[in-house]
Image (cartoon, helix red, strand yellow):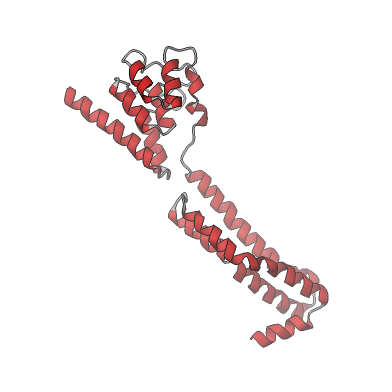
Amino acid sequence: MKIKISKRFDAAPKWLKAYLTFTLLPIVAAPLVYFGSIFIFDNPPNELLGWLLFIAVNSYSFLLLGAAKLSLLLHERYHNALLDFLPQIGVVLLLSTIFVVSDYIAQKDAPPSYPEYSDYTLFEGTTAEPLAQALEEKNWDKLKQLANSKNVNVREKQYGQTLLHLAALNFDPKGMKILLDADANPTVRIYEKSKTIEELAIERLQRGDKSPKLKQIIALINGYKQRSNVAQ
């Protein structure tokens, strides 16, 4: 088989040899590609998608070799330059389709992001502004001194968040604990999405967010609910 492929390559015109040599050059980078593809598993949207991308990325060398062989066979049989390009075009389309579909799935399954909600300046001009600044600076002593039942539940006007929402959306379980200890209310719903902190956190968890801090946030809310039930 190797001899036949070698003979076909030797018999091919110079332009086809140059073309095939050029299309096979990316194979040289295969070890680096393999090393880089390991990081796909750092935080994949789901495990199946991670493996699909890993296999697709590392199969390109074999696909290019197969495409080169097919180009030689097509040239030997049909002597049509246009047909000689088809295998490589097919490889590019196949890999592109896999990456586009994977990206679509990743975007679809990605945990929701609410960057506009997590801005500490939303509380400017409210009685909770000093607390928001302490949260942003992670000044826990200052936050403990300022937090009380009157100011921890102040809602900013744009989205209707409390400081507890702000701490949760910024993955700040320590700040949340201080606010909860000062009687912050975790059942307040933000205006637009009409969801509580717990519902927002569970939504992120269900959609693939594996942050340990997210689980801490849910545990804090559950602990607060249990304490509230005992108190009642």
Residue 133: quadrant of the picture = top left
The residue located at (51%, 49%) in the rendering is 105
Q: How many labels does the image show?
A: 0
Residue 172 visible in the displayed image: yes
Residue 161 makes an appearance in the image? no
Specify the quadrant of the image occupied by residue 7. Answer: bottom right
In the rendered image, the vertical position of residue 177 relative to residue 204, given as above or below: above
Q: Residue 94, image x and y in percent?
A: 62, 61
Residue 210's x, y, as percent? 40, 45
Quarter of the image for the C terminus: give it: top left
Residue drawn where x is 31% and y is 24% of the image: 180
Q: Residue at x 48, y 27 (%)?
A: 117
The quadrant of the image that shows the N terminus is bottom right
Q: Considering only vertical position in the picture, is 63 above or below 167?
A: below
Give the answer, above or below, for where 15 lies relative to 180.
Answer: below
Left or right of 74? Residue 215 is left
Query: Foreground residue, 110 or 167?
Result: 167
Residue 35 point in image, percent of width and height: 54, 61
The residue depicted at 77 percent of the width and 75 percent of the height is 17
Viewer-nearest residue: 95 or 30:
30
Task: Name the spot of residue 149 as percent of width and height, x first.
Answer: 31, 15
> In this rendering, would 137 be left or right of 187?
right
